[in-house]
Every structure is written in C-alpha cells, then in structure tokens.
Image (tube, rainbow, N blue to C red):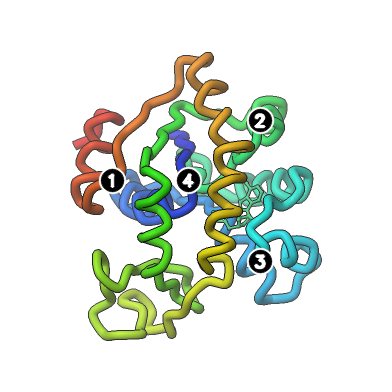
C-alpha cells in the first residue's frame, strides 16, 4: 500500500501513520520528522529548513522533493510506504508523479480548525524519537518521558499558538487543494478525525478496507 495522509497540522496524521505502519508493516515517511532530525544534526538540509519550520512556513519544494526521493530509495520502502506530511503543495504532488512515485490512496483526516488549536496546546513531542503525546487525550505513562524510548518530552517551537494559526492558513491555501488533485485521480478518501485516536483508527481502517 502506497498511502498519502492529508490533513491539517494536528489532525492526527503522525499518530495514525504510526498505527498504520505497525498494522501494514510498511514504513512511515514523515517529512516533518526528517527535517527536525536534520535541524538537530545541523546538516545542510537542516540549515536550509530551520527558519521555515520554526515560523510555520513551508520549506521550498525542491528541498522536500530531494529529501523524499532519497528516503524512498531505501530498501524498506520497496513494499509500500505511508507519506505523512508530503505532498503539501500541488507542485510536490506533481513531482511525485513525474518521478513515478506511486500513490494508491490519499486519505484526508478532517478536523475543524478550533479543535486543532485546542489540541496543539497540549501536544508534547519526544525530543529523541519524535513520538507525540497529548497531556489530556494521550498522556505518556510517566509524565515528561516518552513511552517508547524514555526520551524527554517537550513542546515543539512551531506548536506555539501564533505559529499554529500561520500553519493552518498555509494548510488551507497550499495543501487543501490536494484533495481536489487526488479526487480527480479517483484516489481520495476522507474520514472524520474529530473523535478519539481509537475511533479515528477504526474509520481509517474501514475506509482502507483493512482488518
Ligand atoms: P509536520 O511535522 O508535518 O507538521 O511539519 C513541520 C514543518 O516542517 C512544517 O510546518 C513545514 O515547515 C515543514 N514541512 C514538513 N513537510 C513539508 C513539506 N512536504 N513541504 C514543505 N514543508 C514541510
């Protein structure tokens, strides 16, 4: 299965991608996580991406396309992948097509803006492995510590309320048109993501015809 997850920042793409990745035994390619790791390590890609990521703007398409092409060439992607956070613009989707990177289904997780703003305030992210938690709806077993690797949890800089608003504006302007793009190709499926993680997983599995 070659899957693209669409949805606003905070819609639950990362959380659902990790669950689907385990169910389907295919890797999740999260451009946000790749960029944050590159920034932490001070690589050339990280240096280019930093100011965009921290202010909630999109990183230029050519940087993203290079990063994704490189990652998809790795052997673990041969049987399928879940793209979380890419494509985020029509040119990125066109670049996937131009490079024969297949997409079987684009799944859009629909969540209202106000719910997003409320959710982002409580999001905590592992500084080591990027796993995400929420202080109310998905708390870690030990406060401040990642359930998976024991790393320290923190608040992403771009989860600050003003930056969240900028990211939502960018989503509506640049990314939402991708729904029409994939609709025209008969590949779009939409699900409600307003409810709990488990309920959203259930509707996604139903939409994808798995389990
Ligand atoms: P995310 O973790 O998916 O919310 O991404 C965090 C930030 O990384 C975004 O706000 C952008 O600055 C950048 N980013 C991630 N994926 C992309 C992409 N496909 N195109 C452009 N910028 C991206």
Circle 2 crowding by C-alpha within 10 Å: few under 14, some 14–19, many from 20: some
The local secondary structure at tag 3 comes to: helix
Quarter placement of the C terminus: top left
Question: Which residue has dot 3 on it?
Answer: 54
Distance, label 2 to label 1, CA atoms, is 26 Å
Q: Is 171 placed left or right of 96 in the picture?
A: left
User: Which numbered tag is attached to residue 8?
Assistant: 4
Dot placed on the residue nearer the N-terminal end, 1 or 3 = 3
Question: Which residue has dot 2 on it?
Answer: 90
Foreground pick, 109 / 127: 109
Distance, label 4 to label 1, CA atoms, is 12 Å
Of marks 4 and 2, the one in the foreground = 4
| Horizontal and vertical percent position of residue 196 | 22, 52
The local secondary structure at tag 4 comes to: loop
The local secondary structure at tag 1 comes to: loop
Question: Which residue has dot 1 on it?
Answer: 194
| Horizontal and vertical percent position of residue 142 | 26, 85
Distance, label 4 to label 2, CA atoms, is 15 Å
Foreground pick, 182 / 74: 182
Dot placed on the residue nearer the N-terminal end, 2 or 3 = 3
Dot placed on the residue nearer the N-terminal end, 4 or 1 = 4
Circle 1 crowding by C-alpha within 10 Å: few under 14, some 14–19, many from 20: some
Distance, label 2 to label 3, CA atoms, is 22 Å
**Residue shown at 37%/69% (left/top)?**
122
**Residue shown at 25%/70% (left/top)?**
136
**Residue shown at 56%/48% (left/top)?**
75
Whether the residue under disc 1 has CB within 8 Å of ligand 1: no
């Amino acid at each position: 299965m070659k899957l693209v997850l669409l949805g606003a920042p905070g819609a639950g793409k990362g959380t659902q991608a990790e669950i689907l990745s385990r169910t389907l035994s295919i890797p999740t390619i999260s451009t946000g996580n790749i960029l944050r790791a590159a920034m932490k390590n001070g690589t050339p890609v990280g240096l280019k991406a930093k100011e965009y990521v921290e202010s909630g703007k999109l990183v230029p398409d050519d940087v993203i396309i290079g990063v994704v092409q490189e990652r998809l060439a790795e052997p673990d992607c041969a049987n399928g992948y879940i793209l979380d956070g890419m494509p985020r613009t029509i040119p990125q989707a066109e670049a996937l097509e131009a490079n024969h990177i297949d997409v079987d289904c684009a799944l859009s997780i629909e969540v209202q803006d106000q719910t997003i703003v409320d959710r982002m305030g409580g999001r905590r992210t592992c500084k080591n492995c990027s796993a995400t938690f929420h202080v109310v709806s998905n708390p870690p077993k030990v406060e401040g510590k990642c359930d998976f690797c024991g790393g320290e949890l923190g608040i992403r800089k771009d989860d600050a309320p003003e930056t969240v608003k900028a990211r939502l504006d960018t989503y509506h302007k640049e990314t939402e048109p991708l729904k029409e793009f994939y609709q025209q190709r008969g590949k779009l499926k939409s699900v409600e993501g307003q409810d709990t993680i488990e309920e959203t997983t259930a509707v996604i599995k139903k939409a994808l015809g798995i389990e």
